[in-house]
Amino acid sequence: MSQIIQHRRGSLSGIKALNTSGPIHRGEILVATGSLYISSGSSDSDNYHLSASIFFGGSLTPSGNEYKALTQVISGSGLPSVTTGTYGRSLDGILYINTDDNKLYRLVAETDANPATSGNFTGSHQLISGGGGGGGSSDYPSIGTPDDGTYTDGVFPFTSTTTIANAIDQINEVLKVIAPTSPPNYKGLSFGASGTKTGKLSFGDNHAISGYTNVGDNIGQTYGGSNYASIQTVVFATASTGIPAIVADDETGGFKGIYGASSVGTISANDRIAARSGKGNPDVSAGANGSYNQYAIGDGKVGVMALYLNGARFLTASLSGSDAAGVDQQQDTTSNGSNLTLSATQSVFFSDGIAKLEGAEYRTFTYAIAAADMRNGHNYLTVRHELAGGAPARTAAKFDWIHDDFSGTMAATDNATHPITSSLSAAQGFDTSKVHAVSGIKFYTPGFGASVVQAYTSSFTGIYQNVYPTSTSAITMGSNNMTIDSSTKKIEGSKISTLTGASANKFPDLDVVNHPTTTEDSNMTMSFAATVDITDTGIFHAPGSGTTNAACSFGFSSRVTPLLRSALSAPSITNENRYYYNSITSGSTSEAYVETFRGEIYRQAYSANSIGSTSNTWNGSADLSSTTAGALQAVQFQTKLIDIKSAGNSGVFTTFHGPSGQPTYSSGNVDGGSRSYVRYFKAPFASGYKEFAIEFVGSGKIVPAGSSLFQADDEYFKVEVMRGTTANVAGAGVANAWADPVEGSFSRLNALNNTDHYVPLASSTSNISYTENVTLSGGTTVPTGVIPWKDSSGGVVSANDIFGIHIILPEGFTGNIDAIAFNYTSVTSGNDGNSVTVPILQNVSSGNL
């Protein structure tokens, strides 16, 4: 057994002289006691002492005065100042714990001959642990000195004592800057909400419908839960109950509205929703420089994407499975077409598009839920990224919606079983004081219906199956030329609330208080009343008499538009038109130029030797069945001059609503023979001419006075002209005598025969031609719709000169004259080289003809 000898106990500085003070034998141990100088500065006064006992082991052949230290670890506050000048290298290798920061160092003496009290010599010690920069606990040695002896030629200010951990950390931080960004983990989900409808449900916790799932607080809580305050959970009983709020944004979870299936015939095309679809991470944009694609989801090779429909795991797709390159991976696709589709695994690329960042794979995914996989009523879904090893799943938004695969029957009023009703007695409320007459025929005038009130009722069945709308646009109470009295509106029916007045503008809510067991089969009856309010300027004649402006009739209609269904229209009340109405008495008719046969302001009695010149002297109420005002008179009807027996309903004007006291112009009730129409024109200026023209628009042909074509039941008619004595003395020219302007000394036409020559009327104002563009037998040419004439023996036209026109229609005239105009200027048919004017009637709008 070896003997342990304490050879000497002394100061640390004495270690250097052990060789000269006495030999140390093998196996002997020296205990050196004394103080290490702990430097806190650069001067002697900054140092303090650490008491230490350090064991050294001897050797048979000591090398100089240096002995190997046996002590492994000492500790103290601060780092000891150690130089070769003080202790030699006797302390090199001893581990030292700085209790100030718990860092572990390996002591290394600095090469210096100065004593320890003359400065701070702590920089040579090597940090072993506790200096990892981030509080790391792994033990890493320093990086040491490189082969070229320096780190100053690089990016980082490393020294030989920099720890490996710190060096790697700094390098890693720089790599992070130049490396592409990895895509985010799964965090978002979208739900295509196009076609959503706002409405109310006919089913709920207080009223179940077979096959429909209610929206309840116990539904949808498995994954993330829902606040169903915004979704209808019961059948509403009052109209004041709020409408379910719809979250419109596709990327925000919540109630997405009501959808219908694709049942053709029960749902409008715009509302046929085949499926609900969406995608993962919809708000993720493509990475910088194309490092990853839009909608990327990180951790693309970890775990499973799982779609949950109505609380149950419905579709899954594994991310950790192998992919065929570039091929989508679809799993759990249903026979109805629902699917969850993952893209192939893709790598994150550096900006060169070639180098990949290993370990940063990603995918994208989409989903679709077919209508056939939805249940009627409440549905909800979410998608989760479920990780391996029990790690928490990554979740996103949850979406709720109502699905209604309607298969019932809806109907509007059937006249056979639910007759539409209206009430209006003959002439009830019609104001007979607002009547005027034209050619003996009486017409109501504007304001005649101010007190005409008519009521209307219609019905609809099955329109509350199984959802119903809240919009006021779903109810239409229509009227034509009537003003609906809001106070008379009423919507009522079996199992629904009653709405009246201004509130009667939407579907009433279901009455679950009085009818708690059946509601969705409710019926609706709509009723209201209206006052006739014809404001349109026009002429209206009763059925059988022709209609020039149907907007002057009045009537009712009603329609409902159930939610997700096509609109249902009840048969409308046929527009009421059993009356005579005329608000136009002149149109473009003028004293100087134009006659459109809308009134009889300038019409005059017939006289063989004179022409009247005072307006409003014609008695429009006179019965024209027999001779009146000097002749059998032609009839103005429907803004035309026509045969008396063709007016109205073959000469009959009796209607349900009147006006009453109408004449009878039917066959057998009027005298036979040709009929006359006379009116005057007053020259508006002194033209200085004796040549004139008359324009005609309509259907028919003008013939000379002696033409054999003028006969009963045909389209040919005659025209005569006269000038008043203000321009000519008696007997001069055509003063106070009717003359033929078509053939003879007063005509400016080419000579016409009395057998087959005529001047045709223009069918429209655009067809009027002063140029002779119609060729008759024998090559004779005539204009269209123009009779040019002259008064060579008379004087030139002076202001206020009076001209008369006499139109003679044969009995049973088959044509019609729509308008005439008088031209006072020197215009010609074109055969004598004079200029041709623009027709006067072309300046009259078509609406006034």
Image (spheres, rainbow, N blue to C red):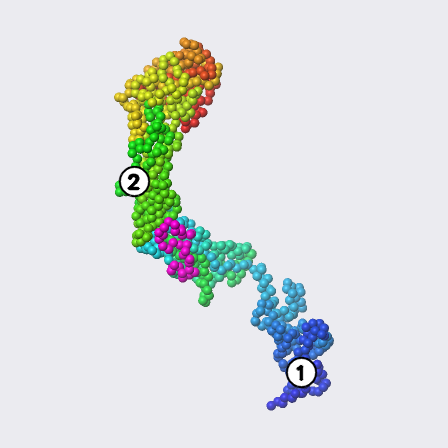
Q: Label 1 is placed on what type of residue?
A: Thr
Q: Secondary structure at mark 2?
A: loop
Which residue is disc 1 drawn over? 33
**Residue lying at 45% horizontally and 57% vertically, measured from the top left:** 397
For the point 33% across and 44% down, the residue is 491
Viewer-closest of 35 and 140:
35
Crowd class of label 2 (few under 14; some 14 to 19; many from 20; radius 10 Å) = some
**Distance between the Cα atoms at labels 1 and 2?**
122 Å
Residue 258 spot, x, y in % from top left: 39, 51
Q: Are marks 1 and 2 in contact (CB under 8 Å)?
A: no
Residue 133 figure quarter? bottom right
Specify the quadrant of the image occupied by residue 425. top left
* Closest to the observer, 709 or 350: 709
Visible residue check, residue 110? no
Q: Earlier in the sequence, mark 1 or mark 2?
A: 1
Residue at left offset 40%, top offset 62%? 222
Q: Nearer the viewer, residue 247 or 393?
A: 247
The quarter of the picture where the N terminus appears is bottom right
Q: Is residue 673 left or right of residue 23?
A: left
Magenta residues span: 217-246
Q: Which residue is mark 2?
A: 420
- The spot of residue 134 in percent (x, y) is 58, 67
x, y (%) of residue 592? 44, 20
Q: Is residue 648 magenta?
A: no
